[in-house]
Amino acid sequence: MLAGKEDRLNVAGHIDKADGAALLFPGQGVQYPGMGKELYDELPEARTILDSACDLLSVDIRKTIFSGAEEELRRTDISQPAIFLVSLMYFEKWKKKNPDTEILAVAGHSLGEFTALCAAGIISFEHALNIVTLRGKLMQDCCSEEQGMLAVLGLEEGSLLALIQASGLEKAVCLANVNAKTQMVTAGLKPGLLELENKLLAQGSAAEDSLTGAKVKWLNVEGAFHSALMKPANDSLLPHLEALAPKKPSCYVVSNADGKPSKDGAEIIGKLKNQMVSKVKWYDTILQIKDLGAKSFYEIGPGDTLKKICMTITFKPKCHSV
């Protein structure tokens, strides 16, 4: 359990600002072969997490994480539990290095929300692992070669949505992630995404003011996450979320769904019920945590993707990789 302060509401019913750290847990796409191996070798608490998962899953996921092929680890049904477990291993490292640091809030990017649930004590490690493993399998079943995700850098949300609508692509492409003010991710079928890419490149070449400097990048994922194409997976996971008996979190949990903090376990779980088909409001999430009064951000997991995103949102508080 994380050490956290009790809710402090002012007379207007708003959350008073409080000091403390914020922990950020990454989502799919940060995986790489060998991640977490040094923690497994050097930190007994981290080793216990992975060994316990192998027992619970009846699969030696250690072998896949440490020495599996990059293509195998890229599979949604494998990468999601792998990232979840390695992120919790990094959480053990963080706790070891920061035994007296108070936690103000936690948040996770997409998949990372489930790691945050576990870290905040809302659900047990076993329940979280089962949910994440099932989530990965269900989403893998929805993936296809026809789906994709395209990052758009340099455009604000309104400008990108206006271009999608003006191009008649609103049924083929959706806005999946708002990671920063000018860092978006779109999702959909590849023909629609290719058309959007061409529109952006053409507009950029024409040097129109609203689109000048826009860049695109295809993400290394197998599906159109956070789009309607994930609805079968979302619907299948829903009964399992509803069956959870969440506990009161030990700190604020800030949701991707609305970028708002909560210490109500049922409310937090409720915001996850349409997560796979809803937009990730990461920009709002980071700004809300900053507004709560966080003194520092820590990315808890493999890589430094969230640290880099945070640097485009705010320099204070600073984000550290663990």
Image (tube, rainbow, N blue to C red):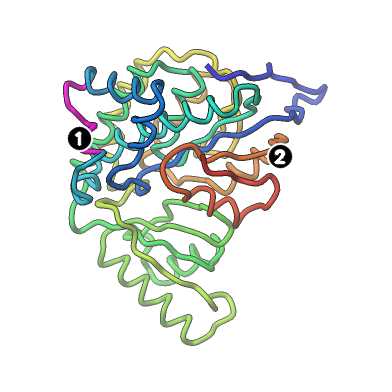
So how many labels did they put on this image?
2
Q: Is residue 229 above or below residue 37?
A: below
Q: Over which residues does the magenta segment extend?
A: 57-65
Other-residue count near label 2 (Cα within 10 Å), few / some / many at <14 / 14–19 / ≥20: few
The part of the image, by quadrant, that contains residue 21 is top right
Horizontal relation, residue 36 to residue 208: left or right = left
Q: Is residue 199 magenta?
A: no
Question: Looking at the picture, does residue 45 appear above or below residue 302?
Answer: above
Q: Which residue is mark 2?
A: 291
Q: Provide the major secondary structure of the magenta segment.
A: helix
- Residue closer to the observer: 202 or 310: 310
> Is residue 60 on the magenta stretch?
yes
Q: Amino acid at mark 2?
A: Asp
Instruction: Read off the residue under disc 1.
Output: 63
The residue nearer to you, when weighing 263 against 312, is 312
Residue 167 in the image: state x and y as whole percent.
40, 72
